Amino acid sequence: MAHIVIVGASTGGMPAAYEIRNTLGSGHRITVVNPSETFSFVPSNPWIAVGWRKRSDTCFPIAPYLKKRDIDFIAQAVTEIQPDANRVVLADGQQLSYDYLVIATGPKLAFDEIEGFGPEGHTESICTIDHAEKAYGNWQRFVADPGPIVVGATQGASCFGPAYEFAFIMDADLRKRRLRSKVPMTFVTSEPYIGHLGLGGVGDSKTMLESELRQHHVKWICNAKVMRVEPGKMIVAEHNEKGEVVKEHELPFKYSMMIPAFKGVDAVMKVGDKLVNPRGFVKVDEFQRNPAWKNIYSVGVCIAIPPVEATPVPTGTPKTGYMIESMVTAVAHNIRDDIAGKQVSEKGTWNAICLADMGDTGVAFVAIPQIPPRNVAWMKKGKWVHLGKVAFEKYFLRKMKKGSSDPIYEKYVLKALGITRLQEESKPKAG
Ligand SMILES: Cc1cc2nc3c(=O)[nH]c(=O)nc-3n(C[C@H](O)[C@H](O)[C@H](O)COP(=O)(O)OP(=O)(O)OC[C@H]3O[C@@H](n4cnc5c(N)ncnc54)[C@H](O)[C@@H]3O)c2cc1C
């Protein structure tokens, strides 16, 4: 019997637990370790931050649902990973031995890299449910006394979709309240152009998102590096394509939300360079395995992926939900094969599919593969995307309660669109 320990219980860790259980069947032990007792659906955080959702709509207790699938749960943070001893140490001092470790710890939010930045400083965040709730408290104060908004993503950020999403959601909320005319908005981003998204653009993303920002009266600054944030003021250096500063902006704001750069979490980072890159992201091979310790797998935002291309101001590559689920499927199959003594062979497709809400409409994009040149790349706008995002939220939450991470209808609908989780060519040829 193998013991599989999964660290983290969010978009990566929860599906990993279910899919490993479904793939291995009974007879193996699975334990999930996560600091919080509740699962929180991160993509709903922009709605939490304007009061369109409450915590109870997007969070649920983890333990009872995992228990139904015979998966153990420990509500603790892992403080230390000891790969040579195949052991993790938890915050309460407990030690847990494993045969396979799946690291799904997401990012550490690097607010500390910019003076005055983040919820402990002068800007809001929507990256966690706690941050999004705090942002909503300040949003209520803001709408009572509105003024300029600065929104976007800083240097080194990789998660650009939610920055655009939140800009359009705030715009929609302010229009509903008939306050939009009192709020000048500026979108500040490290991307070299609007719609780059850390992906070198997807289909018509540049034209479409520029047009949307223009139509919603949002100004923008690209190639932007946030130098520091003071109360009510952001100092931003705009760069040219050679990476030289061409203009310094002092942007006054009454409300600001900026997506930070990400790093690896401390417990993972401190294992050192056999496990992680200099930013603390887990090094994985094409099978999602760490090259140094082959019984350690990793999925989600915490894995190391090089930028799609060099940009004048550093940007990272986003890791989106479906891409993460494709990593999860590869890990489940590879652990099964390794236990059976077979060579591991499954590779996730890492296809990027994203639905970005804009309040009453939305934009969807598909990038297959993620890194250009691509076989499929499109971005489309429509009310269907807003409705699709709401449906996706309900669907994902239901899926995480039912314990099925790859329901049959999802598999066939997406397959009909040419979107699969595993690379076909990675399968061993018959005979
Ligand atoms: C605001 C926002 C909106 C997004 N919207 C979308 C979207 O609409 N569509 C899309 O495809 N993608 C979206 N993403 C991108 C991505 O899908 C999410 O970031 C996703 O939640 C990443 O999942 P993850 O499991 O890798 O990391 P996380 O969601 O960050 O989860 C990591 C988990 O590990 C736990 N953990 C951390 N350290 C430890 C430790 N030491 N010990 C134990 N557990 C630990 C954390 O508490 C957490 O539960 C969004 C991202 C953000 C920030």
Image (cartoon, helix red, strand yellow):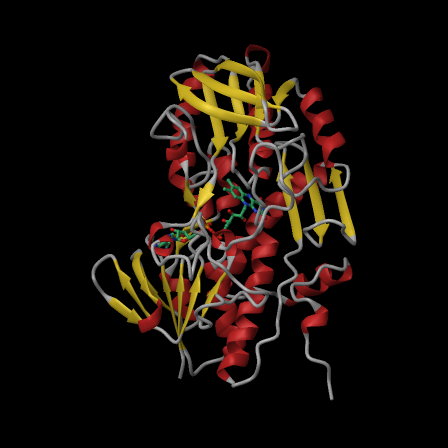
Specify whether 244 is left or right of 269. right
Q: In which quarter of the image is the C terminus?
A: bottom right
Q: In which quarter of the image is residue 61?
A: bottom left
At horizontal 74% and vertical 41% (from top left) the residue drawn is: 379
Q: How many labels does the image show?
A: 0
Residue 259 percent location from the top left of the image: 49, 34
Residue at position x 39%, y 18% in the image = 230
Compared to 207, does 74 lie above or below? below
The answer to whether 26 is drawn above or below residue 106 in the figure is below
The foreground one among 44 and 6 is 6
Q: Position of residue 272 (x, y in %)?
A: 37, 57
Give coordinates of residue 98: x percent, y percent: 36, 73
The residue sitting at the left extreme is: 93
Between 173 and 267, the one nearer to me in the picture:
267
Tell me if 319 is positioned left or right of 264 in this view: right
Residue pictured at 51% horizontal, 31% vertical: 154
Q: Nearer the viewer, residue 416 or 419?
A: 419
Where, quadrant-wise, is the N terminus in this rendering? bottom left
Where is 247 relative to 169, above or below?
A: above
At horizontal 57% and vertical 14% (from top left) the residue drawn is 184
Q: Is residue 324 left or right of residue 361?
A: left
- Residue 368, compared with residue 69, is above or below; it is above
